Amino acid sequence: MKVEFLDTTFRDGHQSNWGSGMPIGMMEAVAEDVAKSGFQVVEVPMMPLQFKKVVRDLREDPWEMAKMLAKKMPNVTKAFMGEPAIFPFEIINAPEEIVKLYYKSITQTGVLNRVQIMANIFGNVPELYPWYIPMCRSMGLQIALAISYALSPRHTDEYYAEKVRQQAAHKPDVIYLKDQGGLLTIDRIRTLMPIFLENSNGIPVELHSHCTTGLAEAVYMEAAKLGCPTFHTAIPPLGNGTAQPSVLSTAQNLKLMGNEVDLDLERIKSVSERLSSFAKQDGFPIGAPSPYDYSQYIYQIPGGVISNLSHQLKELRLQDRLDEVVKETVEVRKDLGYPVMITPYSQFVVSQAAINVATGERYKVVIDEIIQFAQGIFSEDSGFTWMDQNLKDKILDLPRAKQLATQKKVDVPLKKIREKFGGPNLSDEEFLLRYIMRGTTEIDTMREATKAGPWKTYSCRETPLFDLLKNLSNQPQITLFQVNSPQGSLVLQKAK
């Protein structure tokens, strides 16, 4: 069987292992080789939340990042995680015209060819799919529908078979199993992968997992035996850790199993060596295989949510109660009908658990998102129909629940939103950046930081000759290059 690969290095790989902290210059140094390595798809960090990270923490311009990646990788399919909102936490009240403008602008840069949608998270939210998927299709984007994996009494084989059939009816280009928590085991993939393959109506199937529990690569091998043709991997040092399995070891193991792997592994090894060198220069961690961690199966809290929770509890001087909050999340998730622990639900569950512990009384204070959850705003897939009935009745009887129930979505005209952020003369890119950053303060700080130049460039100290030759090859005016030394001369001439 021929096996294909989706590369997550620039998006999920560095979001998982480096907190989305990879500078633009580091991507630029390897992007061309990543694109030429034979990956079927390359993920790019084009989500609005990542735009915020680039502006706020890296102090770089995300639109310039988009244009650079489009220029360096013109001939490979480029994908991002999409949703019918600018931010997942605002999924209910997302201004439709803003979302459409964002997709139009990001697509026009040439950096986007495929949109990956968490189908059983956002897919059945009322009034979203009918306009969202047609919009993506109208822009020529491939549609990949992800069905997120979870452990609970309601996430049965029957549940997944139904979800695959539902999503296949939308006729996407791809359906994939998204194991965002790294919770799949060899035994579970043996039951799930056949369900995906049998119910997808011939639509290609992919597998995405994380190395959180140390089992992802072994799960990939078993999935390949069952006929899964495409796997999501990352290039070390962005592979392993809490990200996807390393493409190098995954490809090697799949080849040993008799599969055909059409990747330029020597080129990928070169990228890996350079990224590892850059990581050491900037103090980034090197992704390593994770030990088996059974606690993930109990708490199912994503690593990024745990780190944010720890920070927030420290600010509240409650850091010594982290274990209590983590245990309370298990109970809150059960109370709510077992939502999938992924954005935005994981944040809702953890926030409510923290409040329960801090106040000393469960649900004495209830956040708006949990009230909306109980009202069914997030669709049947959220789990609200499985909620503890006494808790649901208590929440729906709150005065705040009655206020939220009477609030209707106000579809503010795009013209009015533009006026708030600078008026009609702003370019679409500048307007969207201001909308995402909620003003100009952080954008001004970013632009002040970029006055000296667009971004830091990276070269690999371990391979200076490689970098020299690569840079010379990119200079069209240089056709002949000669190096003289006491031991002899080296002459290189570009092929005509």
Image: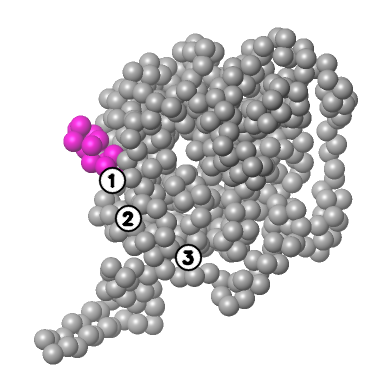
Within 10 Å of disc 1 (Cα), the crowding (few <14, some 14-19, many 20+) is: some
Amino acid on which disc 1 is placed: Leu
Q: Evaluate if marks 1 and 2 touch, with contact meaning CB atoms under 8 Å apart.
A: yes
Within 10 Å of disc 2 (Cα), the crowding (few <14, some 14-19, many 20+) is: many
Q: Is residue 420 left or right of residue 223?
A: right
Q: Evaluate if marks 3 and 2 touch, with contact meaning CB atoms under 8 Å apart.
A: no
Magenta residues (range): 246-260
Using the image, determine if residue 327 lies above or below residue 451. Answer: above
Disc count in the image? 3
Q: Is residue 40 left or right of residue 389?
A: left
Using the image, determine if residue 410 lies above or below residue 18. Answer: above
Residue under label 3, please give it: 25
- Tag 1 or tag 3, which sits nearer the N-term? 3
Amino acid on which disc 2 is placed: Ser
Q: Secondary structure at mark 3?
A: helix
- Residue at 62%, 21% (x, y): give it: 332
- Tag 2 or tag 1, which sits nearer the N-term? 1
Q: Main secondary structure of the magenta part?
A: helix
Residue under label 1, please give it: 248
Amino acid on which disc 3 is placed: Gly
